Image (spheres, helix red, strand yellow):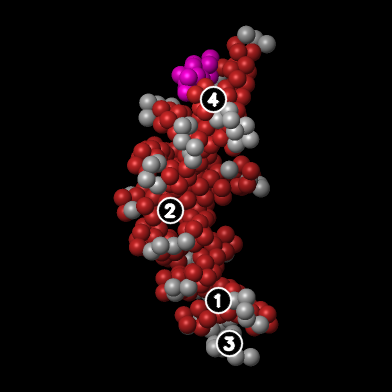
Amino acid sequence: FDTGFAFLPSAFVASMEEAEKAVICMFSQAEDPRIRKQASDFCDSLRQQDGGWRLACTLFLHSKVLEVRFWSLQALHEVVLHRYAALTPPDCAELRAFLVSLVTEQVPKAEFPAFIVNKIAQLYAALMRNEYPETWPEAATSVLGALNSGLAVVDMFLRILDAIDADIVNAEFHRSPADSAVSMRVKDALREQCIPDIVSACFTILESYHASHPALGKTCLGVLAKYIPWIDIGLVMNDKFVPAFYTLLAREDMLVEAAGCLTEMVLKKMEPAPKVLHLRNLVNKEMLEGALRARQTDPDSAALVSLAALVASICKELLVAGEKLSGR
């Protein structure tokens, strides 16, 4: 066969051109299946060899082909998940530096599509899982400090927060006691180090972009709803966030996410007496009724379902707290 490159033994460190051609061949649906299989085997050998992670970093930075960049991120993600213990401390430091530079310097200059940005966020969260806070205490603050670099970094910041929830914090993904321990370690470190700054940054994002870039606003609200269950309720139970959430109930494109934030605030665990006081301060009956009335003509809408879930949560939490207070 003639693919334009030689399939070299795994011990050989391939050139950028050879590696790029191999990845392109592997992803090409027009290529002969046998050639694609050989290209795939060749790429696997590159990933497995010593220093393969460094090849992936260099390939990402030098190739303009999206499939090649995605493969590079996949290769790095596999190393972080399954072979990270084999890296030396200098290797780990180099990989961290590459990823921070990618997020804070490359992302603002490049227009990466969503599937690339999502993979970067997933890789960032995976590295935090291994190294935060002991070896990499600046993992979160590095991104916070770069938020003024533009919309791309703001978007990246929110995707990283989402990936942290999905791959570390969310109990649905805990498959072992070790997963739970990692989740607790990361949450405790974030609470101690920078959760107030993260939440404050989210408010700034909402305030700055909910009108001009509604997709960022929706994403931000979605992230907040995932973090509210385990952060200090006072960070969002204030005269900034609560009015903002209720105001956004009037936005058709953000109602579901805003209602989700309010629902998580309603469900926040606390003793019955403080819970009743909390709900008294949180619930804005007039604004809820107004939002419900505005959507009565569309009973099947996701917006109405979200509002109904919010109202049901309020009623249930009040009933449970009342029963506990009455000694039932």
Label annotation for residue 293: 4
Q: Is residue 306 above or below residue 20?
A: above
Mark 1 burial class by Cα count in 10 Å: few <14, some 14-19, many 20+: many
Mark 4–mark 1 Cα distance, whole angstroms, equals 55 Å
Left or right: 146 in relation to 218: left
Quadrant the N terminus occupies: bottom right
Q: Which residues are magenta?
A: 273-288
Q: Earlier in the sequence, mark 2 or mark 4?
A: 2
Mark 2–mark 4 Cα distance, whole angstroms, equals 37 Å
Amino acid residing under circle 1: Val
Q: Which residue is identified by label 3? A: 3
Residue 226 place in picture, x, y as percent: 53, 39
Q: Residue at x 58, y 24 (%)?
A: 311
Q: Which residue is identified by label 1? A: 23
- SS class of the residue under badge 3? loop
- SS class of the residue under badge 2? helix
The answer to if 283 sits in the magenta stretch is: yes
Q: Residue furthest front?
A: 297
Q: Residue at x 58, y 79 (%)?
A: 25
Q: Quadrant of residue 30?
A: bottom right
- SS class of the residue under badge 4? helix
Amino acid residing under circle 3: Thr
